[in-house]
Structure formats: C-alpha cells, structure tokens
Image (cartoon, rainbow, N blue to C red):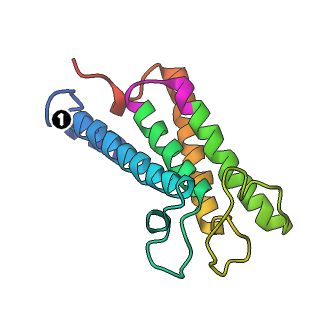
Amino acid sequence: MSISNHIQANIALTDGPGSPVSVIRMVTIGVGSTCIALGLAVVVGWLLRTDYLIEIIPLLATMVFNTGLGLVLCGLGLVAVVVHDRRALNICGVAVLAIGGLTLLEYGLNANIGLDELFVRDHLLVNTSNPGRMAPVTALALVVGGGVISMLGNLLSRNRELPASRPSR
C-alpha cells in the first residue's frame, strides 16, 4: 500500500469545521494573504519611496519592486485555488514565471533587458551589481512558485476542483 493510499484510508477528507480539507483551505488563504500583504508593502514602499518598507536592514540588499510584485501574484494565485478561479491561476502563474524566468535569463546572459527597472527606478545607493534586480535564488523561487501555480490551474481545468479547495457544504 502506497503512502498516499494509506493516508487516504486513515484520514476522512470530509469538508466540515476542523477537517483536514478545511484546515488546508484556511492555511492556503492565510499564506496567500500574507504574500499579498508583504508584496503590497514592498510595491507601495517603492512607489512612495518609503525606504523602511523595502530596506529592513540599512545598507543591505533591498527587496526589489519585481520581487514584491511576484509575491502579490503568488498570493493571488493561492487564493485563486480556494475560490476556483482557473483564469486567475493561469494568469498569476504565467506572470510569476515570466518575472523569475526573465530575471534568470538576464543573469545567464549577463545582460539587461530592462525588466529590473521597468516599473520604478532604484533610488537607493546600495552596492549591487544590477540596480533593481532581484537575487538569482529569488528569481528561481519565483520560477518554481509560478510553475506550481500554473500546474494547479491546469489541474483545476481538468478535474474541475482540487481536493483541498472544495467549497464548504
């Protein structure tokens, strides 16, 4: 018996208060909302030039605008899972993949295609190799996150619903 079959046999995946499905749904909404809030704080910080929202420790690397935007889109994608919005899942997933993938491409080609300061110019005098560019590991995390969100959108379109996102009855 596989692990997943064993878990399914021993855990009733009913959808009532306190059930595993209900808990997963609430955690998904919580994590998504946290990503949205953190990402919006960074985006607003860049738009209003409010340094303490984007530079937690002075003179260290800041959270760049595109990272904040990626967090907002990842959070919206997580919430879209719960509300069954396949279109939002696909849009968020592709956008996050594009932000992360294009940034990795810039690093790989040692080029600047203009994505780093597309929305705002980096006004902080922090010693970075490319002003406005997120770290490569952050870009990789966005590629993975965008890929997962896109896959969830595809699963949702095939199966009509995901077990952890079924609405309460």
Q: What stretch is highlighted in magenta?
A: 81-89
Q: Residues within 10 Å of mark 1 (few under 14, many from 20)?
A: some
| Residue at 39 percent of width and 44 percent of height | 32
Please tell me in which quadrant of the rendered image residue 20 appears.
Answer: top left
> Relative to 77, is 36 above or below?
below
Measured as percent of width and height from the top left, residue 121 is found at 69, 60
Q: Is residue 41 visible in the rendered structure shown here?
A: yes
Which three-letter amino acid code belongs to the residue tagged 1?
Answer: Ser
> Relative to 38, is 21 above or below?
above
Is 11 placed left or right of 38 in the picture? Answer: left
Is 28 placed left or right of 63 in the picture? Answer: left
> Relative to 22, is 160 above or below?
above
| Residue at 49 percent of width and 57 percent of height | 45
Q: Does the magenta stretch include residue 83?
A: yes
Q: How many marks?
A: 1
Q: Which of 15 and 12 is in front in this view?
A: 15
Measured as percent of width and height from the top left, residue 96 is found at 61, 46
Q: Does the magenta stretch include residue 68?
A: no
Please tell me in which quadrant of the rendered image residue 162 appears.
Answer: top left
Please tell me in which quadrant of the rendered image residue 120 appears.
Answer: bottom right
Q: Which of 62 and 141 is in front in this view?
A: 62
Residue matched to label 1: 19
Measured as percent of width and height from the top left, residue 24 is found at 29, 40
| Residue at 61 percent of width and 54 percent of height | 66
Q: Is residue 2 visible in the rendered structure shown here?
A: no
Is 150 placed left or right of 22 in the picture? Answer: right
